[in-house]
Amino acid sequence: MSEHFARRRYLLNFDSQRLGQVFTDVLVIGAGVAGLRAAIEAADSAQVVLITKDQPAECNTAYAQGGIAVVSNPEDSIEAHVRDTLEVACGLGDKSLIQRMAAEGPRRIQELTSWGATFDLENGAVALGIEGGHSARRIVHARGDATGREVSRALARKVASMESVRLFDQCFVIDLVVDEGRCLAALTFHPKYGHQIIWARQTVLASGGAGCLFRETTNSPAATADGHALAFRAGALLRDMEFVQFHPTALYVAGAARALISEAVRGEGAYLVDRDGNRFMQNYHPDGELAPRDVVSRSILRQIVATSATCVYLDVRHFPRGRFAERFPNIAALCRDFDINVERDLIPVRPAAHYMIGGVAVDADGRSSIDGLWACGEAASTGVHGANRLASNSLLEGLVFGQRAGAMAAQTALQRHSAAGPSAFRSFLEPSPRTELDLADVRNSLRALCWRNLGIERSRDRLAETIEIVDFWARYVMDKVLSDRAGWETQNMLTAARLIAEAARAREESRGVHFRNDFPAQDDRRFRGHVTLRRSEGGIATSFEPLRA
């Protein structure tokens, strides 16, 4: 039962007065695009501690290939970008926030350029690509297919130049300390310094996504839903957890980790073909290969089943000689590593988990339901993506709302006259009499279960099976006090999987990336709104918030 998750307020037994103490104005958790941008903004006026559980470069931002959706073409407009985003969001996009995001895009690109980011040019102007769901060329990219890496580099360089930012890398945030509805601190572990408590006047959660819940994913190994799980334990309201986006085209080589093949490849004219060499996307959607991601992912899955295959293929053999390697140097190199000559061979692909749309429910400024806790990036549910994210809006969202959350957190922190703490907080969980399961096996089995039952297509029976199995594992895992990153990640992954399954069970319709075989139609009368989740004494409290007309 879900009480196994509700019972665990903290994963760690601790006495705050016996831990190492760190104090700061603003604590930022996560060093992807949203966290870095939040830290930069907050550091303009406040002291900042920036935490990442790995090296700063190991995050989903660095894995992003396609680019940033920004209006910078005379034939394009902010209104068109907003319209495209709303169309893909399937009735759940927040128009006012989407307008803010689209309007701020050009300014954020100029800012990155001033901090040393270099974007690709064509005839002296910023080169623009096109991707699925966009009505115009507006995808700004860097080094062909290494946009995320370039954005990360520029932001990290800016952070390093700011004396008011302290970076704690290899530092794992285990839990947030909340007292009387206010977030006061974070419990952390560092291999060198051990357990510490970081007291912060304000905390920004930018901990990234949840792709590693699924066996097939394009995500960094660090994307284990830590922020979603610790926010749930802290009592924050979570929203739209059923909306997990699957990217249609990850390189499929048996036995190898999945690697993203950017949507920009299809934007440049690549065809999707089945095992017999037949183009099939026009059979599913009039936009063919450039249909929205959820449509393309489901279409590929159905074509795989129809042809009794394990994958489909991207065909770029019609590109001018040398063009693919010039435009997508990293993807070309990846293909060469697997002896795929893109000028002669087809590229095997299939969908993989890619982006977490749901997360901590926040307002227009990034403020969560807990005083002193803000969220941005993949850890947050801002409302700009609705039920399906438009391609290349993710880096843009991180830049725009990371900046806003950082600014508001710093402003609020400086209005507080003293730093939080060091109040006395203690947690103690009685030793469990149950046998501990093999955590590596649980983790691998969980990823397979989520891929099978929480993946591209879902059903009531499969969701019920998922909840039953996850609850069984939780009996033997969530009742333990574990002592390392792998253990805490596994507990977080179980928690997040349970939340996704609960939200998916509650939404008895198909909308955007959430597709129910047993409820294949979109039902605006019952479900035009948000599924929300919160920790309760009985387990997980689920509710539905209809959108205002």
Image (cartoon, grey):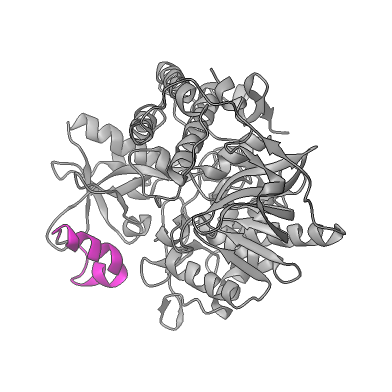
Q: In front: 347, or 474?
A: 474
Range shown magenta: 318-340
Residue at the farthest front position: 18
Q: Is residue 465 above or below residue 317?
A: above
Q: In front: 229, or 133?
A: 229
Q: In front: 224, or 422?
A: 422
Give the dominant element type of the magenta stretch: helix, strand or loop. Answer: helix
Residue 534 in percent (x, y) is at: 65, 30
Residue 458 in percent (x, y) is at: 41, 25
Question: Is there any visible trace of residue 386 in the rendered image?
Answer: no
Please state the total of marks drawn on the protein image. Answer: 0
- Residue depicted at x 47% and y 54%: 134
Q: In front: 144, or 130?
A: 144
- Residue depicted at x 61% and y 64%: 37
| Quadrant in the rendering for residue 248 | top left
| Quadrant in the rendering for residue 358 | top right
